[in-house]
Image: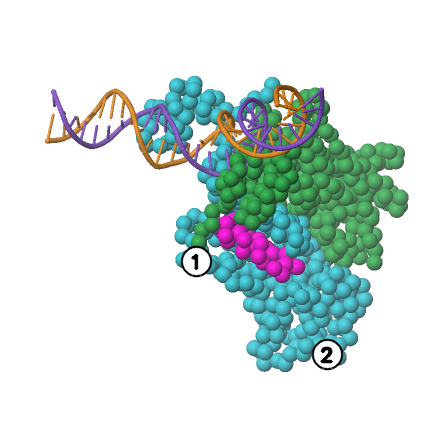
Chain colours: A green, B cyan, C purple, D orange
DNA sequence: TAATTTAACACAAACGTTTGATATTTTGTA
DNA sequence: TACAAAATATCAAACGTTTGTGTTAAATTA
């Protein structure tokens, strides 16, 4: 038996009241007497009335929905970001419309369009690696839909964003290794097309300079982040004339690969070479020989701050020009591995 | 300068046509001449018209949105499931409304309610561990909103679901170890409140019986899945009078913990004890001494099948009773670890 | 030519809710 | 008692779109 949803109209008819009275009663409007409010609410409950959100969305021109576009949902970093975002959205009674770009600019563009038509109230984005043109985001501005970028932010002015300062963590990492007595420190970096690689490199270099040590560019080796690539990069460093006693790697996975192949070589070098990596992801907890430390980038906090500022934006009626742009920087932080 | 969204009304006025003609023209309705169709579409493009989805949703009583409720977005298993789900939804022009229950029954209930009011077209759920009462899902039935459960399915009749048969993989796992010569095989299982634990245990026992081996219940140790708990469970097994030469563990993480603590004991036992676990998660690739095999549960495929059947349900106008219930079982599968 | 079909479009209701303006009733005041 | 003020409830428009039914003129048929 098909059961049609109850509307306020039917409640009105049943109580012999007008539609507007019922609506106002349900909202506790002061111009409705308490007694009728009671009656209406009572009847609504009895009839199992459920407000039709699509009607409300339409009528209000607001959906209480925020869009989230991430590069890859299956990546731990973004998974924990979206998790944090959803938590806050839930608390604030917003709903999350989720999509992934798979690091494809065209798809990202289409998603933005789709979400715009969905009349999301605001958008959270971590942009795709390949995205070079940002017009699709500019378009949202015209439609008065605020956008907050996070982690992977576009290199343009006049945007709201939350990002992580990799440099601080990088400097901490190198300082940490220096303090432990290392004097030749290698860097297995990612492809230099990535902003993230540049940031790591900068921090690495700065730390050396600050410690009045000279920087040897040949101690930096790029790699494609695969296991094979990592192995190759590692070997390059092992054959270096000033063989490093410590290595900073682009992320925990690279460290894992490097440590694994080091141990395969059975040189017992793992006692002599110490690793520091980025991300501080959970795999560290499962490694027998984890890197001694990892630079945490706080995906959950970034996501949280991002949605916080978005909600802020949504609840202020001033427009963007007058209130300026939110720019939040999270400091990355070196986290030493637990020994147990 | 605030730019109000263009409506078909304005297009109509500009072209001196009726609203309905514009609407029909944009949809290529046969009763509108090709020439006016051209004109209208042209004008729509010029004026940068974008259909107001909320109005359409409201009007049609359909949102082209499907809700997805998962226990934990940050868990690798669910992250890859949602990733697969979103991909298909995107292809079929549906949108995904995402939420996580954090394994909390009350929250799950509220989410179902919220999504119902959002007028989602259908729902995909992996139920919370604690959920004992399933009335909130029954409620959706009254509202004609189809639900497809996946992976964590409720123990009730008359539902659509996609699930993974753990037993086959479990039997494979034990057979595999037997074939490798092991005769005493331990099982570090999860808490027996979990259905998943029961399934593993059943498979384990069945495999032994099938091979005419007698089953020793003391070779099964429950644990709370933490590192400490795993360690304790491992020690119990090591002290067993028939010390196992192979151990099946609840999941890859438990294997990782166990292998780690085994190596800490420095007994070189790792050469003698082989592990097989469940999930085949990515951490295996980063372990120096991974389990020899792992039972893959195909989160992406489960997610994919789940949304496929949901879309099927949405596109058939017959109601549930007449068409019966979809019950899809994915066979789990033992995957041997790569050696490289 | 008159009757009939067809093509092309317009009209208006409907979806469920909110809300500003208005009407009615009650209460208070002089 | 008369009148203003306050309290309470109603009316009706609006949000943007779709769609069943009318309407008109042109094309076809007999």
> In the image, residue A79 lies at what x, y percent?
66, 46
In the drawing, does residue A337 fall left or right of residue C2?
right
Tag 2 subunit: B
State the image coordinates of residue B218 (x, y, percent, origin top left). 71, 76
Q: Nearer the viewer, residue A320 or A124?
A: A320
**Boundaries of the magenta span:** B122-146
Q: Which residue is mark 1?
A: B321
Is residue B280 a member of the stretch shown in magenta?
A: no
Same subunit, labels 1 and 2: the answer reads: yes
On screen, residue B215 above or below D23? below
Image quarter hosting the C terminus of chain A: bottom right
Q: CA distance from mark 1 to mark 2?
A: 54 Å
Q: Earlier in the sequence, mark 1 or mark 2?
A: 2
Residue placed most toward the observer, A84 or B322: B322
Tell me: residue A110, above or below residue B270. above
Instruction: Name the spot of residue A2 as percent of width and height, x first.
Output: 45, 51
Mark 1 packing: few (<14 Cα in 10 Å), some, or many (20+)?
few
Q: Looking at the picture, tell me which residue is in the foreground, B224 or A143.
A: A143
Say the numbered circle drawn on residue B242.
Answer: 2
Residue at (60, 26) in percent of width and height = A144
Q: Is residue B35 left or right of residue A140?
A: left
Q: Residue at x 68, y 70 (%)?
A: B187
Give the structural element (helix, strand or loop) at label 2.
loop
Residue A67 % position (x, y): 60, 37
Q: Is residue B127 magenta?
A: yes
Q: Is residue A334 left or right of residue A233?
A: right
Q: Quadrant of residue A98?
A: top right
């Amino acid at each position: 038996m098909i059961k049609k949803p109850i509307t306020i109209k039917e409640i009105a008819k049943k109580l012999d009241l007008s539609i507007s009275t019922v609506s106002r009663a349900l909202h506790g409007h002061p111009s409705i007497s308490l007694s009728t409010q009671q009656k209406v609410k009572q009847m609504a409950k009895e009839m199992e009335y459920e407000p039709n959100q699509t009607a409300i969305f339409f009528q209000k021109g607001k959906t209480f929905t925020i869009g989230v576009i991430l590069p890859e949902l299956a990546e731990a970093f973004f998974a924990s970001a979206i998790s944090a975002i959803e938590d806050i959205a839930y608390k604030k009674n917003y709903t999350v419309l989720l999509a992934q770009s798979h690091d494809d600019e065209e798809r990202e563009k289409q998603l933005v369009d789709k979400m715009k038509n969905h009349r999301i109230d605001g958008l959270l984005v971590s942009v795709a690696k390949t995205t070079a043109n940002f017009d699709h985001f500019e378009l949202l501005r015209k439609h008065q839909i605020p956008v907050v970028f996070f982690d992977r932010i576009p290199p343009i002015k006049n945007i709201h964003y939350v990002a992580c300062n990799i440099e601080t963590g990088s400097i901490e990492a190198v300082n940490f290794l220096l303090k432990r007595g290392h004097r030749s420190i290698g860097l297995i970096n990612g492809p230099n097309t990535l902003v993230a690689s540049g940031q790591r490199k900068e921090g690495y270099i700065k730390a050396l300079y600050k410690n009045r040590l000279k920087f040897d560019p040949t101690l930096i080796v790029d790699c494609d982040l695969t296991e094979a690539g990592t192995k190759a990069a590692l070997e390059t460093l092992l054959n270096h004339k000033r063989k490093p006693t410590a290595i900073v790697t682009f992320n925990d996975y690279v460290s894992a690969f490097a440590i694994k192949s080091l141990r395969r070589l059975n040189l017992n070098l793992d006692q002599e070479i110490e690793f520091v990596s980025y991300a501080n992801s959970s795999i560290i907890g499962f490694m027998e020989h984890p890197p001694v430390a990892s630079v945490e980038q706080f995906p959950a906090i970034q996501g949280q701050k991002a949605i916080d500022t978005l909600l802020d934006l949504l609840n202020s009626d001033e427009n963007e020009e007058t209130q300026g742009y939110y720019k939040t920087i999270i400091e990355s932080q070196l986290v030493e591995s637990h020994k147990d």
